[in-house]
Amino acid sequence: MDLFEEISKTKKDFPMRSAISNEFHRQTFNFYQGFAIVLFVILFVLGIFLGNLFATCQASSYFYSDECLVTEFNFSVMILVWFGGFLLSTFIYAIGHIIELLKSIDEKLVKFQR
């Protein structure tokens, strides 16, 4: 038993770009799934925008001072918006997927009843 022969027997080539593109274009989305994808992209950009808008103070001139010498990008707000957007988008996408599954079940039942 040669290890290299086993590897060559089970080795597969990488899929070509056209095969990947055809697989992706075969996928159809309903309204909820499309809305979830667009919402995730919007919330992704909004997380970056809000992280810059609500900047954090790096250092102050004195220990009990209110003024900031240097402001930094707020990663915690960005990650919070990204995580919340991911959860919301995933929930909406799952609802759309459940609707698609129920539609396909209904179509099969209608064909079966005829």
Image: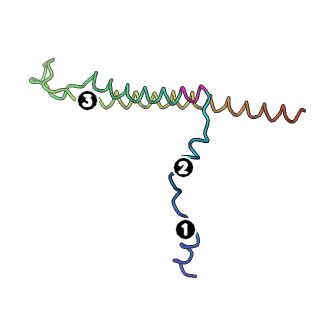
Q: Above or below — where is 19 with respect to 91?
A: below
Q: Which mark is residue 73?
A: 3
Q: Position of residue 22 (x, y in %)?
A: 58, 46
Label 1 and label 2: CA atoms lie apart by: 19 Å
Camera-nearest label, 1 or 3: 1
Q: Position of residue 80 (x, y in %)?
A: 39, 29
Residue at position x 48%, y 31% from top? 86
Residue at position x 45%, y 28% from top? 84
Given the image, on which type of amino acid does mark 2 rest?
Ile
Disc 2 residue crowd, few under 14, some 14–19, many 20+, Cα 10 Å? few
Q: Residue furthest front?
A: 18
Residue identifier under label 1: 11
Disc 3 residue crowd, few under 14, some 14–19, many 20+, Cα 10 Å? some
Residue at position x 31%, y 26% from top? 51
Going from N to C along the chain, the mark reached first, 2 or 3, is: 2
Disc 1 residue crowd, few under 14, some 14–19, many 20+, Cα 10 Å? few
Residue identifier under label 2: 20
**Which quadrant holds residue 33?**
top right
Q: Is residue 66 magenta?
A: no
Q: Is residue 42 left or right of residue 30?
A: left
Q: Is residue 33 magenta?
A: yes
